[in-house]
Image (cartoon, grey):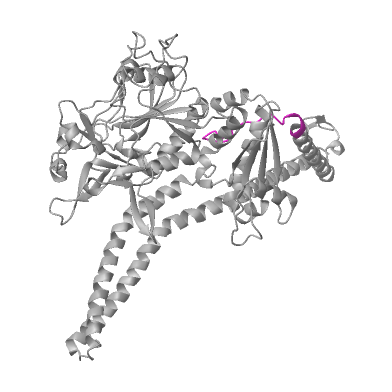
């Protein structure tokens, strides 16, 4: 009698054992299946490469390869083709993998721009080999060639953009430190080539920063160059000084810089109001107490050292109190004490750095520090239509002082420090403002005053009652930020007056003006992070190890220094320039003991330093094992178990077939 069996492999019912697939046939079927799967995989990839070139999915945490809506708006306004030429030496990436990773991101981002621009952005990629026409063109475009150890010849890593009228913008060399602002730099280049900028700053208000003749010691005028911040501005934009009584801002002013507007006539303040409402951009420096004006001005019947745009700020719902200044003991600067024997923290003079600066803004991201003096603070009223984005803020636990506590002939830093009471908030010292706002002059243009230059007079036929769109304004509650004496020291070098900046005030102002002269969309571009992704667990272990062993390491180092100093004293006594002095047996024993102590402390210090690295090295080995060995081992084990299971199934089928036979 013949019994029917069921094939475990095919699921078919067979009555003849000879119909059961044999091991040799099954191996051939498996090989054919693998070949077909490989062919299918290749076919799918080839099809995707040709048909899905514009389809991408960005799965990175910081959306590193996605363009922001601000960039999309700039690309939509491109009318004529723009050519981007990316010059990158592949040798750089092969020798320095960090640059290679960054270059891949730059190339992918540029390709994304080209894909999204609808043919208006043309991307060309070059590898400038030494002594080739491509290298010559890169040099002619002004790109920076860098010589690195271990790389043959100079290498390039830059970008050149040109338009149909031969205007040129360039990134001489992509610095990894600026990776977070890659999109900002590329978008700014495209905007400049497509729209162009007039690049002129209109300076209105206090002209001290541009004057080259100032009162020196003894009340005598001295010939000095303009303030260093003015020189930094002139590196990126043209500067035009506007008369304080001007009643209309000229059309060729791309950005208005208002400084300490305490003496501006009402019709000039109205001109500022109308300029901003009409879409003009402005950087405004106001102050509750300008140190440059001195304590006498601040203690008059009206605080003559204060400045604000009262009508305009009031309409916007922006407050900058003129009777309060910010004190910060954490950011306070050290000054000489009253006795001249030491230093004390002067809490109204601040050096803002690190968390006091907005690291996501292109204005402050690469500024090391900003020095301010007796600064005020900005805040919005509850009903303000504005959005405020802080750029400079005080530290947590800051406080406020009355202006009169600082505006004295001889301020007492120690008394202010003793009176310091930490508050519960941080204070905004500088911020960008955006939003639709009403005019600060609802009754129209003020009445003209008699006299003055008739060429400065202007009567508005149409008065704007609200802004055409969201305004672009940056307000700084400190004017001393522009004064050299708070952030620059000067030295005489071979007869030349050399400026040595102690803070980044010039960079902050130049960055602000440069960023705001472009499209308002550029101000919406924030830092995106970097392609470098450190192991968070490893970084945490490093910090914990530092905290655990740092105090012990410092203690051992102090012990080592003390011991070495004692030992050095004995040795110098044993062989000074005046002739050797014999040491007693007790002193010789002390020297031997100190020498042994030095060896012991050094050994213990090495053990502590090794402990700092032990946990990290252990984790690194574990990660290497997981990434290199563990997965292949698991795959091999899975394959081994699968083969054993399948072999047992085949053996059972053959045993069943033999039994039924």
| Residue 33 coordinates in the image, percent (x, y) | 80, 38
Height in image: 381 above or below 644?
A: above
Q: Between residues 288 and 249, which one lies in front from this camera angle?
A: 249
Height in image: 618 above or below 86?
A: below
| Residue 563 coordinates in the image, percent (x, y) | 25, 74
The kind of secondary structure the magenta stretch mainly shows is loop
Q: Between residues 259 and 508, which one lies in front from this camera angle?
A: 259
Residue 659: name its quadrant. top right
Q: Between residues 212 and 418, which one lies in front from this camera angle?
A: 212
Please tell me which residue is depicted at 16% across the width and 51% down the height of the picture.
337
Q: Can residue 392 be seen in the rendering of this structure?
A: yes
Q: Between residues 615 and 460, which one lies in front from this camera angle?
A: 460
Please tell me which residue is depicted at 35% across the width and 34% down the height of the picture.
207
Q: Is residue 391 left or right of residue 569?
A: right
Q: Is residue 230 left or right of residue 14?
A: left
Q: Which residues are magenta?
A: 49-66
Q: Is residue 451 magenta?
A: no
Residue 440: name its quadrant. top left
| Residue 170 coordinates in the image, percent (x, y) | 60, 41
Q: Is residue 58 magenta?
A: yes
Q: Can residue 402 be seen in the rendering of this structure?
A: no
> How many labels sit on residues?
0
Image quadrant holding the N terminus, namely top right
Image quadrant holding the C terminus, namely top right
| Residue 537 coordinates in the image, percent (x, y) | 44, 46
């Amino acid at each position: 009698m013949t019994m029917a069996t069921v094939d475990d492999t095919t699921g078919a019912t067979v009555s003849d054992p000879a119909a059961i697939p044999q091991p040799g046939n099954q191996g051939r079927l498996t090989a054919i299946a693998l070949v077909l799967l490989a062919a299918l995989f290749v076919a799918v990839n080839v099809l995707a490469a040709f048909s899905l070139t514009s389809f991408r999915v960005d799965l990175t945490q910081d959306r590193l390869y996605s363009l922001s809506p601000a960039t999309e708006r700039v690309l939509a306004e491109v009318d004529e083709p723009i050519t981007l030429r990316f010059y990158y030496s592949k040798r750089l990436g092969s020798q320095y993998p960090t640059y290679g990773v960054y270059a891949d991101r730059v190339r992918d981002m540029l390709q994304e721009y080209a894909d999204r621009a609808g043919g208006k952005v043309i991307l060309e990629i070059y590898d400038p080999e030494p002594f080739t026409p491509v290298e010559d063109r890169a040099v002619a475009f002004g790109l920076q060639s860098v010589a690195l150890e271990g790389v043959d010849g100079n290498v390039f890593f830059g970008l050149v953009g040109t338009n149909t009228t031969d205007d040129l913008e360039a990134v001489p060399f992509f610095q990894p430190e600026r990776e977070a602002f890659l999109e900002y730099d590329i978008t700014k280049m495209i905007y400049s080539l497509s729209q162009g900028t007039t690049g002129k700053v209109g300076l209105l208000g206090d002209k001290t920063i541009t004057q080259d003749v100032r009162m020196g010691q003894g009340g005598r005028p001295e010939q000095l160059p303009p303030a260093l911040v003015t020189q930094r501005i002139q590196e990126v934009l043209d500067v035009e000084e506007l008369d304080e009584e001007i009643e209309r801002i000229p059309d060729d002013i791309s950005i208005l810089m208002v400084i300490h507007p305490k003496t501006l006539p009402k019709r000039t303040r109205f001109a500022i109001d109308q300029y901003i409402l009409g879409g003009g951009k402005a950087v405004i420096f106001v102050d509750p107490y300008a140190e440059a004006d001195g304590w006498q001005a601040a203690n008059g019947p009206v605080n003559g050292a204060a400045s604000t745009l009262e009508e305009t700020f009031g309409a916007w719902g922006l407050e900058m109190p003129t009777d309060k200044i910010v004190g910060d003991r954490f950011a306070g600067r050290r000054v000489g004490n009253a006795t001249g024997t030491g230093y004390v923290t002067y809490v109204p003079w601040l050096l803002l750095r690190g968390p006091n600066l907005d690291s996501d803004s292109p204005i402050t991201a690469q500024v090391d520090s900003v020095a301010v003096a007796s600064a005020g603070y900005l805040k919005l009223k509850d009903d303000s239509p504005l959005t405020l984005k802080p750029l400079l803020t005080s530290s947590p636990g800051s406080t406020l002082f009355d202006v009169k506590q600082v505006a004295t002939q001889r301020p007492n830093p120690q008394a202010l420090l003793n009176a310091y009471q930490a508050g519960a908030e941080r204070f905004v010292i500088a911020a960008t403002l955006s939003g639709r706002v009403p005019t600060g002059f609802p009754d129209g243009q003020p009445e003209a005053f008699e006299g003055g230059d008739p060429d400065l007079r202007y009567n508005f036929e149409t008065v704007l009652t609200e802004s055409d769109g969201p305004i672009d304004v940056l307000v700084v509650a400190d004017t001393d930020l522009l004064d050299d004496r708070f952030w620059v020291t000067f030295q005489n070098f071979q007869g030349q007056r050399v400026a040595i900046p102690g803070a980044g005030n010039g960079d902050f102002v130049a960055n602000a003006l440069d960023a705001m002269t472009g499209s308002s969309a550029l101000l919406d571009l924030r830092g995106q992070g970097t392609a470098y992704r450190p192991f968070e667990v490893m970084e945490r272990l490093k910090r914990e190890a530092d905290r655990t062993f740092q105090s012990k390491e410092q203690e051992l180092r102090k012990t080592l220094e003390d011991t070495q100093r004692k030992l050095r004293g004995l040795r110098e006594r044993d062989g000074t320039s005046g002739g050797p002095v014999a040491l007693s047996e007790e002193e010789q024993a002390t020297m031997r003991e100190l020498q042994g102590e030095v060896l012991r402390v050094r050994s213990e210090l090495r053990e502590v330093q090794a402990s700092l690295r032990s946990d990290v090295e252990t984790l690194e080995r574990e990660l290497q094992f997981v990434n290199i060995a563990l997965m292949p081992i698991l795959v091999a084990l899975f394959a081994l178990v699968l083969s054993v299971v399948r072999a047992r199934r085949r053996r059972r089928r053959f045993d069943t077939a033999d039994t039924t036979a």
